[in-house]
Image (tube, rainbow, N blue to C red):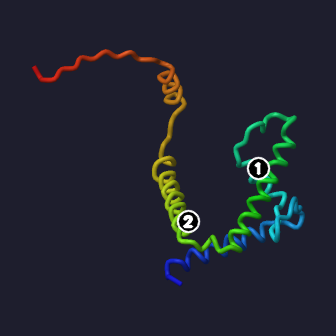
């Protein structure tokens, strides 16, 4: 094992341990997918953080939740099947994982170095909204030479 992978492995096991200890005894099992379970807290967290249509429509809310639960079950089953087939060890998966890691690190760095240092006052925001609604018509002259 490479020296670089030790911190990643340690972090993975720490996160897994925190996840296991964070699940309370009262956390109900909503569904089983193969040898994996979907808990109530996982379902609620993933459902609330996933954008979806008809979320505000109360008449379609139960159908939306049920559809999302089926999607989670399918995801767990696909993951188990791909692991059983060894698809997670393919070179393309390793490359994709590295690219996702780069993307997340880049986004975190951008947030830390750019987004967190921007402070916009209410007046600046109002001024920006006003400018957004303003349409400018610009005429200009163009010439091939300086003269």
Q: Secondary structure at mark 2?
A: helix
Q: CA distance from mark 2 to mark 1?
A: 24 Å
Q: Which residue is mark 1?
A: 47
x and y percentages locating residue 22 in the rendered image: 78, 66
70 relative to 17 in the view: left or right: right
Q: Do the numbered discs 2 and 1 sit on residues whose CB atoms are within 8 Å?
A: no
Give the SS element for disc 1.
helix
Badge 2: residue crowd in 10 Å (few <14, some 14–19, many ≥20): few
Point out the tag, 2 or 1, that comes first from the N-terminus.
Answer: 1
User: What residue is at 65 percent from the left and 74 percent from the top?
Assistant: 86
Measured as percent of width and height from the top left, residue 135 is found at 45, 17
Residue at image position (81%, 66%) is 23
Vertical relation: 32 (above or below) 85: above
- Tag nearer the camera, 2 or 1: 2
The dot on residue 13 is: none
Which of the pair 48/83 is nearer the observer? 83
Q: Write down the quadrant of residue 94 in the picture.
A: bottom right
For this view, does 58 lie left or right of residue 53?
A: right
Q: Residue at x 76, y 50 (%)?
A: 47
The C terminus, quarter of image = top left
Question: Which numbered circle lies on residue 97?
Answer: 2
Q: Residue furthest bottom?
A: 1
User: Badge 1: few (under 14), some or many (20 or more) residues near its Cα, within 10 Å?
Assistant: some
Check the image and report above or below for 79 versus 135.
below
Image position, residue 43 (x, y; %): 80, 55
């Amino acid at each position: 094992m490479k020296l670089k992978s030790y911190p990643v492995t340690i972090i993975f096991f720490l996160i897994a341990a925190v996840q296991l200890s964070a699940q309370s005894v009262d956390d109900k099992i909503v569904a089983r997918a193969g040898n994996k379970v979907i808990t109530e807290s996982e379902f609620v967290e993933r459902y609330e953080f996933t954008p979806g249509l008809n979320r505000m429509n109360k008449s379609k809310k139960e159908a939306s939740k049920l559809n999302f639960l089926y999607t989670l079950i399918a995801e767990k089953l696909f993951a188990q099947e791909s692991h059983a087939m060894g698809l997670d060890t393919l070179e393309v998966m390793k490359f994709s994982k590295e690219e996702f890691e780069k993307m997340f690190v880049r986004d975190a760095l951008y947030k830390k170095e750019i987004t967190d240092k921007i402070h916009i006052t209410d007046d600046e925001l109002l001024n920006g909204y006003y400018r957004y609604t303003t349409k400018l018509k610009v005429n200009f002259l163009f010439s091939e030479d300086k003269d």
